[in-house]
Amino acid sequence: MFVDACAIVSIMAEEDSAATYEEALSKAPAAWTSALAAWEAIMVLSRADQLNCRFVEADGAVVEWIEARDIALRDPPSPRETLAHAVAVAEKHGLGKRALSNIDCFHYAAAKATKELLLTLNRALRATDVETMPKRLTEKPVSSPSIHPRRTFHRASFDASGGNPFAKLRAGRLQDEELLLKQFLGRSSLHLG
């Protein structure tokens, strides 16, 4: 099963659709994602309304999460076939708002070229001829994360072991903020007590 960026973001951010993705992913005998899908998830998760972190920090968290869930990070075997599928789906379904994004075309193409299921709730991708999971929708389908940037983190348990790859980022930021506050208070007549 090919895991698209929407699924990665949804599960890591524990969005409303996370449980639906988790259930479908748990039924897959093997799961994989591409560098492009991981990159898109990294870009979304690093936004100010998400983790508000550097790309390299989000990269570490996404890769750690992928590895903890035994999701292979690889590319489809035939770049030419993948390209042909991406071009064909763009031609048939269009690009832009209320259609496929450029990256959606490559998620579709990765699943199509490998003849595997595509893990997505993205309306535009589900309207194509590629077979998608989950089979039935239990909530309103989502669009591409590049179209809907408003995502928030609800709880802090992102990987399979229950650990949190973002905890280090947040803890490091809090320590830096505390240090800056102490330095400021040390130079200021203002003291909080």
Image: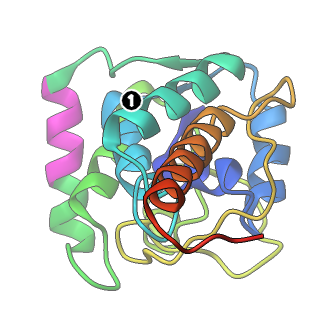
Residue 111 visible in the snapshot = no
Residue 21 visible in the snapshot = yes
Q: Main secondary structure of the magenta part?
A: helix
Q: Name the colouring of the figure.
A: rainbow
Magenta-tinted stretch: 80-87
Is 64 in the magenta?
no
Q: Is residue 191 left or right of residue 149?
A: right
Tell me the quarter of the picture where residue 38 sits. Answer: top left
What's the residue type where badge 1 is placed? Ser
Name the element at disc 1: loop
Residue at x-position 43% and y-position 58% = 187
State the image coordinates of residue 108 (x, y, percent, origin top left): 38, 48
Residue at x-position 42% and y-position 50% = 53
Residue 25, compared with residue 138, is above or below; it is above
State the image coordinates of residue 8 (x, y, percent, origin top left): 58, 45
Residue marked by disc 1: 34
Count residues near mark 1 (Cα–Cα under 10 Å), then give few for <14, some for 14-19, many for 20+: many
Is 83 in the magenta?
yes
* Quadrant position of the C terminus in the picture: bottom right
Q: Is residue 8 left or right of residue 29?
A: left
Tell me the quarter of the picture where residue 159 sits. Answer: top right
User: Of 119 and 38, which appears nearest the observer?
Assistant: 38
Residue at x-position 15% and y-position 65% = 91
User: Of 68 and 136, which appears nearest the observer?
Assistant: 68
Task: Report the number of numbered marks.
Answer: 1
State the image coordinates of residue 192 (x, y, percent, origin top left): 70, 71
Q: Is residue 100 left or right of residue 112?
A: left
* Quadrant position of the N terminus in the picture: top right
